[in-house]
Image (cartoon, rainbow, N blue to C red):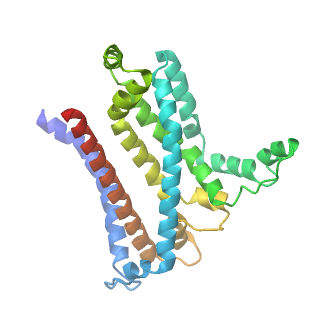
Amino acid sequence: MSNRRNLAAYPHIVWSALFIVAPMLFVLYYTFTDGAGDPTLENITRIGTSNYLLIFLNSLCMALIATVICLVIAYPLAYIFSRMRADTQSIMMVLIMLPLWMNFLITTYSWMTLLEDTGIINTLLGYIGIGPLHMINTPGAVITGMVFCFLPYMVMPIYSVMAGIDPRIIEAAKDLGCSDRDVLFRVVMPMSISGVISGITMVFVPSISTFYISQKLGGGTFQLIGDTIESYFTGTAINFHFGAALSMVLMIMILISMGVMNRFGDENEERGLLK
C-alpha cells in the first residue's frame, strides 16, 4: 500500500520540480550573475536606488488599498450569503464566480470602455449634468480593476468558513443572550479569521504583482513592480538578470507577508481555543 502511495506522489513531485523548483533555480542564477555568467551582486544593489524603491512602495500601497476594499466588500457579502438558504447560496456563489469565467483581457478592456472620458459611465453622468470625470489612466482606475478582478478570491474563502460554522453555535449564543450584533462580532468574526487570512493572501499576492491591469487602466502614467519586471523580459531593454533580481525581491516580499498573515491567523486561533 505504501508503494502505491509513493507511486501516486511521483507525478506531483515531477510537476513541482519542473514548474516550481527549476524556475526558482533559474531566477537565483540570473539574479546573482551578469551577462557573461560571472557572479555579481550588482543586480541586487541596483534595486536599492530610490527609483525602484518608490516603485516597490507604490505597488505595495496600491495592493494594500485594493485588498482592504475587497475585504470591506467581501466580508458582509459572505456573511449575507452564508445565512441564506442552501439553494440560494449556490446561485449567489455562481454569480460571484462569473467574472472568473471571463477572459482576463476582455474584463480589463471592458473597464477601459467604462472608464474612458467618453465611456459609458461618463455618458450616463452627462445625462444628469455631471462630468465628464477623468477616471481612466489614474491610480483609482487601476485599483478599481484590481478590486473587480480579485474580489471573488476574497469572497470565496470567507464564505466557505462562514458556511461551515455549525448553526447550533449561533443558536447557543442567542440562547445565552447575544444579540445579532454580538453574534457577528463575538462568534462569527473570531471563527472566520482563517477565511479572512486566506482571502487577504489570495488578493494581495496577485495585486502586488499585477502588470496588465496597470498598463491598460493606468495608461503608462505610472509604473508598478509587475510592469517593471515585465519590461525587462519583453521590452526593448531586455535584461534577464536584473528582471530576475526584481522578481526575487518581490517573491521575498510576498513570502514575508504570507508568513506574517499565517502567524497572525495562528495566534488568533490559539486565543480562540484559550477562550
The image shows residue 204 at horizontal and vertical percentages of 45, 52
Residue at image point 70% right, 47% down: 110
State whether residue 198 is above or below residue 18: above
**Residue at the outermost front position:** 177
Q: Residue 199, located in which quarter of the rendered image?
A: top left
Residue 117's place in the image compared with 28, above or below, is above
Q: Residue at x 87, y 42 (%)?
A: 127
Q: Residue 10, how many percent across, how many down? A: 24, 45
Q: Name the foreground residue: 251 vs 117.
A: 117
Residue 270: percent from the left, percent from the top? 21, 39
Which of 262 and 2 lies nearest the eye of the viewer?
Answer: 262
The reply to whether residue 151 is visible in this rendering is yes
Left or right of residue 162: residue 234: right
Residue 161 in view here: no
Q: How many marks?
A: 0
**Residue that protrudes farthest toward the left in the picture:** 2
Find residue 189 and report its horizontal and vertical position in percent. 38, 33
Q: Which quarter shows the N terminus?
A: top left
Q: Nearer the viewer, residue 184 or 209?
A: 184
79 above or below 224? above
Rendered-image quadrant of the C terminus: top left
